[in-house]
Image (cartoon, grey):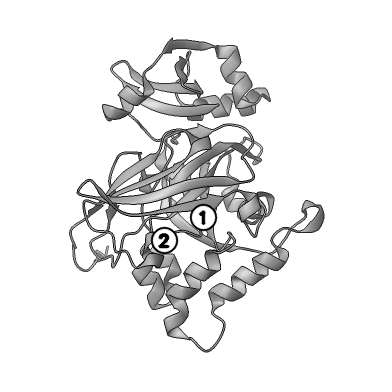
């Protein structure tokens, strides 16, 4: 089952889709409300939808063309929504990252390669226990979440704005502090790769950027082997395209291990909070020498996730030095 949120003339509706058949979930105020209902009733999200039933069929492709697509889930208070991620989690991801950092110290193993090897050796512990810690980063709150179709705006001070095609887990924290996974979505973990390349300790700076996810949430089990495609269009022409893979068959960490190392912190188990956690990628255009330009369009797609995730690149004006007002 795939879930999305659409803005109609009557208001926001949740759309459930099986194959090509899409219909409005009856009486659902939002995907967030459905997820909270699932937690409170002890049901799965699919069961909650089955009990509510489906209403009128919708032309999802037509609504997309009209620009009515929203984020597939949002928190009523964006400050209680967290965008986070883990890197160096995919087989081959160290090659791309190491190439970015190799100029700084070509004679020795980089920190990226060391961390990748830690995951390779201990990211999937036998028996499903706790394994090696991954690289982890924070991207921002729900204020940084960009709807499918809307522009990813690079700040005026940025040196680069590049795509990263990833899979994200969508989580809601229950009243007892227990994380519950609603499902999975495509994500563009938009980053500043030039800033990151200057010094690995600037990774945190490079990740504090907007991100987009969706348009649909895949409810249920994630395939172990996912094959997708990432591309950039410039003036309507594809200037770069490359396949990407994800799923545990292509990763050095298990999802359970990555989830543990995020939710082991009490601060990320606050009741009612929404988490969109991105699980990394081994494919990005910057690694192939591509520099995205304002007006370029990022497209990420993979069959299990339904509609492609499409966002144009924009850039905010440089507002100069940030100044603090003394009180």
Quadrant of the image for the N terminus?
top right
Residue positioned 64% across, 36% down in the render: 221
Q: Is residue 116 left or right of residue 238?
A: right
Q: Is residue 174 left or right of residue 107?
A: right
State the residue in front, 25 or 269: 25
Locate residue 72: give its quadrant: top left
Q: Are marks 2 and 1 in contact (CB under 8 Å)?
A: yes
State the residue in front, 186 or 82: 186
Q: Is residue 147 left or right of residue 204?
A: left
Residue where numbered disc 1 is placed: 85
Residue positioned 19% across, 63% down in the render: 318
Identify the element where label 1 is drawn.
strand
Residue where numbered disc 2 is placed: 207
Residue 210 bears which disc, if any?
none
Question: Which of pointers 2 and 1 lies earlier in the amino acid sequence?
Answer: 1
Residue 142, above or below 40? below
Find residue 284 and report its horizontal and vertical position in percent: 42, 59
Residue positioned 31% across, 60% down in the render: 161
Locate residue 40: give its quadrant: top right
Find residue 222 and report its horizontal and vertical position in percent: 61, 40
Find residue 49 and report its horizontal and vertical position in percent: 56, 18
């Amino acid at each position: 089952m795939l879930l999305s949120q659409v803005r109609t003339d009557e208001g926001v509706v949740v759309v459930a889709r099986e194959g090509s058949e899409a219909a409005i979930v009856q009486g659902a105020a939002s995907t967030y409300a459905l997820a909270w209902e699932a937690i409170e009733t002890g049901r799965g999200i699919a069961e909650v939808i089955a009990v509510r039933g489906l209403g009128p069929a919708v032309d999802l492709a037509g609504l997309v063309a009209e620009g009515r697509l929203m984020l597939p889930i949002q928190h009523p208070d964006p400050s209680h929504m967290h965008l986070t991620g883990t890197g160096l989690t995919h087989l081959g991801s160290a090659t791309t990252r190491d190439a970015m950092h190799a100029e700084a110290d070509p004679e020795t193993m980089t920190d990226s390669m060391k961390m990748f090897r830690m995951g390779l050796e201990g990211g999937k512990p036998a028996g499903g226990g706790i394994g090696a810690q991954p690289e982890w980063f924070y991207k921002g709150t729900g204020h940084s979440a960009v709807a499918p179709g809307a522009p990813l705006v690079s700040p005026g001070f940025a040196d680069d704005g590049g795509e990263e095609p990833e899979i994200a887990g969508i989580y809601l924290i229950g009243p007892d502090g227990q994380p519950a996974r609603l499902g999975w979505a495509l994500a563009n973990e938009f980053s500043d790769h030039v800033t990151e390349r200057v010094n690995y300790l600037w990774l945190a700076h490079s990740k504090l950027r907007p991100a987009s996810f969706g348009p649909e949430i895949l409810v249920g089990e994630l395939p172990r082997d996912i094959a997708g495609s990432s591309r950039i269009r410039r003036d309507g022409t594809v200037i770069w395209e490359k396949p990407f893979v994800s799923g545990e068959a292509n990763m050095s960490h298990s999802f359970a291990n990555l989830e543990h190392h995020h939710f082991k912190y009490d601060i990320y188990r606050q009741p009612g909070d929404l988490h969109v956690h991105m699980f990394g990628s081994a494919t990005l255009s910057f690694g192939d020498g591509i520099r995205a330009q304002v007006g370029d369009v990022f497209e990420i797609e993979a069959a299990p996730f339904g509609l492609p995730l499409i966002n144009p690149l924009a850039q905010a004006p440089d507002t100069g030095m940030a100044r603090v007002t003394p009180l």
